[in-house]
Amino acid sequence: MVNCKKRGIRCLCAALLCAALLCAAAGGAAAADGGGLTLTAAGAELTGRSAEEVVSMMGLGWNLGNTFDATGGRGATHETSWGNPKVTKELIHAVKEAGFSVIRIPITWAQELDARHEYKINDAFLSRVKEVVDWCYEEGLFVIINVHHESWLNVRDLDKKYREVGTELAAVWKQIAAYFAEYDQHLIFEGTNEPRMAGSAVEWSGNREGYKAVNYLLAVFAQTVRADGTGHNDERCLMIPGYAASCSGNVMEAVSLPTYDGKVVKNLIASVHCYSPYNFCLKDTQKTFSGADEAEVEAVFKAIKSAFLDHGIPVVMGETSATEKGNTEERVKWAQCMGRCSQAYGIPIVIWDNGSDTKSGGESHAYINRKTCEWNYPTVVAGLFEGAKSTERGSALTGGGSQVAGNAVWSVPGGKKSGEAWKSSFLTMSAKATWFAEGREIGIVYTPDDGGAGEPKVILDSEIKQAWWIPVEPTRYADEGDRKIIWYDYATLSGAMSANKVNDPSELRNFMVITTEPGVTVYEVVVTGDAKLTYMVNGQRYASGGQYPANPESEDWVFEGWYLTKTYEGEYTKDTKLDGDAVVYAKLRLKTDAERAAEITPTAAPTEAPAEATPTAAPSPATAPDKAGQESSGSTLRTVGLVCAGVLAVAVIAVAFCLKRKKQRKE
């Protein structure tokens, strides 16, 4: 009996121990799969917000550069392989204490991927990234994670290999999305960094085929995250950069918004990088920041507004900086300008910090000492916040210019005065032949001096030596509230050119606006004229001249209609009436694998129903089921609870069996 009693106790203990171990394993597996939800310092989840709302909560940000994005080392040595120390909790706290509300964590995954096993990410590396993300959450910060210096993505022939690259991109983002699914909307995914054809002749400028390839990758990224369907991935904000994340107008206009489930993917944020003026920000050749440089920066924000904000697409400037070269006071001017523009346009900026204080070669962007957590250039950082506090958020979106017919080609909030911010009386822009066409007018929006007198003058700068300075007399004047518009029509402009032996507008070099009276302030230069329709298809412009084009065909995309905005609102048909210049956008979606296969190897319908099969892997982005057809996997706690309940039931049965055996032996 003693032996039976001991045996029964052993059965009970073994069963309970098994239950405990299996419950712990289930909890650990759930944590490894989803990373676990970490709330902000305030303990409140951020959920149910639109991308516009999330961006409006974001302020100035800081990049943890040259760390997890390094391309040397693996696992534990990865983040220090480029010379920066291991990230500490104190560093993250110091960034928060300085006033920053966003931390962007650039990440290179290439050396952490196992190509033999569907590009599986190194678990230890994922766990380390999670640790730093958690520190950011504890500080109540917004966090951006991305794929960064990926040699497998930024290939020279990306225009030809984008499908192959897309397969790996989907595999990587599928894992990242699942691992961080339970993190709320404080965590933002950025699909790529500066996607481009690295090493090619058009590495940084791109071309139409390059734009198309990047649009393909953006669609793969967005669909992969949305197809995950767990945690907050159905509402997570997704940052999408155009080719090389350029702030060039051509590149930004080339971005096609990805679709999912028949609609434009919700909660998208356009991602741009800005190192303007280039010679000041990234080269040793320019140490001063002038009024003309300030105008260049503001022109970039104006172009961003035109490309994205005017279409209801929020923007985050994921990188910007000015390299240190012993010119701290000039960098403060730059920082104040960037902070003011960020606030005026409602575009959060995230300064690039690579931890390098070399003071040469354009790579000196160490704003903080990562070992001591003290700021190397506190006045530059202060300049960012001073600029942001100097104006009202979004002020450039609600005023500061006439926007005549929506055709402003140059605009600055608050305007520019002669001899003040310019340090000269010139506003110089590259002349475009398209401005000088039949039926077009160029207008200068301005306010006169305090006495109500004075007006700007226009000068055309020609390539022809004997006619390099061509003054133009105004055609007419108009009033717009307290502002005036001085107009120059085609006949006046062409007459002035002909009188100076300039017969082709392409021979013009610059269009200059001159103010001689200090009180005259110029706000905008606008170009208006006859209606002209432009069709945008995957980064390619088609000027129709009023002709309705055929639907675009592509081996990768399915055409789903023309729309008047980038966000596919306002369907356009042959009968749509347009006033002034307009752009219509092709709504495209990626073809599914089945659609591609059917085009390549069409087969006859089966004669009998195929046997049911259990899928072995999640569907690819192109074949993901509709959201309505997806079933949520449930929360981590529910899963662990069900597993534990099942295991405890097994334990009870085991104990009952042992007691029964004991009774039988006794009998």
Image (spheres, grey):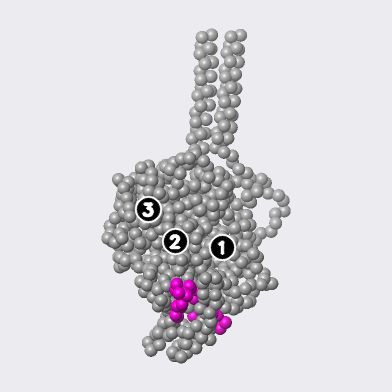
Q: Residues within 10 Å of mark 1 (few under 14, many from 20)?
A: some
Q: Residue furthest toward the right?
A: 607
Relative to 65, say whether 601 is above or below: below
Query: Tag 1, which secondary structure?
Result: helix
Indicate the position of residue 37 as horizontal and vertical percent values: 50, 40
Q: Amino acid at mark 1?
A: His
Query: Tag 2, which secondary structure?
Result: helix
Q: Amino acid at mark 3?
A: Gly
Indicate the position of residue 603 as horizontal and vertical percent values: 66, 59
Relative to 132, say whether 324 is above or below: below
Label 2, on which residue? Answer: 341
Q: Confirm whether residue 377 shows in the render.
A: yes
* Residue closest to the eye, 611 or 207: 207
Indicate the position of residue 303 as horizontal and vertical percent values: 48, 66
Which disc number belongs to residue 311? 1
Asked if the stretch drawn in magenta spans residue 257, the answer is: no
Q: Amino acid at mark 2?
A: Cys
Residue 666 is drawn in which quadrant?
top right
* Residue closest to the eye, 433 or 170: 433
Q: Residue at x 49, y 76 (%)?
A: 444
Q: Residue at x 59, y 29 (%)?
A: 646
Q: Are marks 3 and 1 in contact (CB under 8 Å)?
A: no
Which disc number belongs to residue 221? none
Q: Residues within 10 Å of mark 2 (few under 14, many from 20)?
A: many
The segment highlighted magenta reads 433-458
N-terminal-most mark, 3 or 1: 3
Label 3, on which residue? Answer: 65
- Which of the two discs, 1 and 2, sits closer to the camera? 2
State the separation of the CA atoms marked 3 and 2. 23 Å
- Which of the two discs, 3 and 1, sits closer to the camera? 1
